[in-house]
Image (cartoon, rainbow, N blue to C red):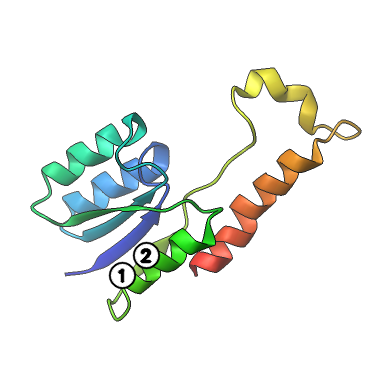
Amino acid sequence: MPTVLITGANRGLGLEFTRQYVGDGWTVMACCRDPDGESAEDLRAISDGADGRVHIEKMDMLDHASIDVVAAKYKGTAIDILLNNAGIIGPVPIQDHLDAQHFGTIDYDVWDTVVRTNTFAPVKMA
C-alpha cells in the first residue's frame, strides 16, 4: 500500500490532499501543529473513517525537534510521496497587516518567520 506524508494536513489543500489520498486507498501520515485542537477537527473525522490508514502527527515546521521526532518514529518506513504543503503568508488576520510587508515597510521579524517556515522547514523535512 503506498504511503504519503503531508505537512499542513489539517486544513485547506493539505486536508483535501489527505481526503483524496485516503479515498484512493493510500496510507497517510498527516502532520499538523495541533492535532488535538479545533483546527484539526475535520482531519480527525477523516482519520476516524479511514480504517487506521491515517496517522495524525504533531509537527510544527518551525520546531525542527518536532520534525526529528516524526522522522525517528517512521525511520525505516517507506514514504512514496512527501507533500511539503505547510506554509504561511504572515500574521493573521491578513487585512490588519497589509502595510507590514510592502517595500519600505517590511516587518523583518515577520519576514524571517515566513522564510523559515516556507523555505528552511521544507528542506529540513526533505
Q: Are marks 1 and 2 in contact (CB under 8 Å)?
A: yes
Question: Which residue lies under the disc numbered 1?
Answer: 73
Q: Position of residue 50 (x, y in %)?
A: 12, 49
Question: Which residue lies under the disc numbered 2?
Answer: 70
Vertical arrangement, residue 7 with respect to residue 125, above or below: above
Q: Residue at x 59, y 26 (%)?
A: 92
Q: Residues within 10 Å of mark 1 (few under 14, many from 20)?
A: few
- Outermost residue on the left side: it is 51
Q: Amino acid at mark 2?
A: Val
Q: Position of residue 105 (x, y in %)?
A: 87, 31
Q: Position of residue 90 (x, y in %)?
A: 64, 35
Q: Residues within 10 Å of mark 2 (few under 14, many from 20)?
A: some
Q: Position of residue 39 (x, y in %)?
A: 36, 32
Q: Amino acid at mark 1?
A: Lys
- Outermost residue on the right side: it is 104
Measured in 3D between alpha carbons, the distance from the residue under mark 1 to the one under mark 2, in whole angstroms, is 5 Å
Q: Residue at x 49, y 49 (%)?
A: 86
Relative to residue 104, is residue 23 drawn left or right?
left
In this rendering, does residue 80 appear at all?
A: no
Vertical arrangement, residue 18 with respect to residue 26, above or below: above
- Outermost residue on the top side: it is 96
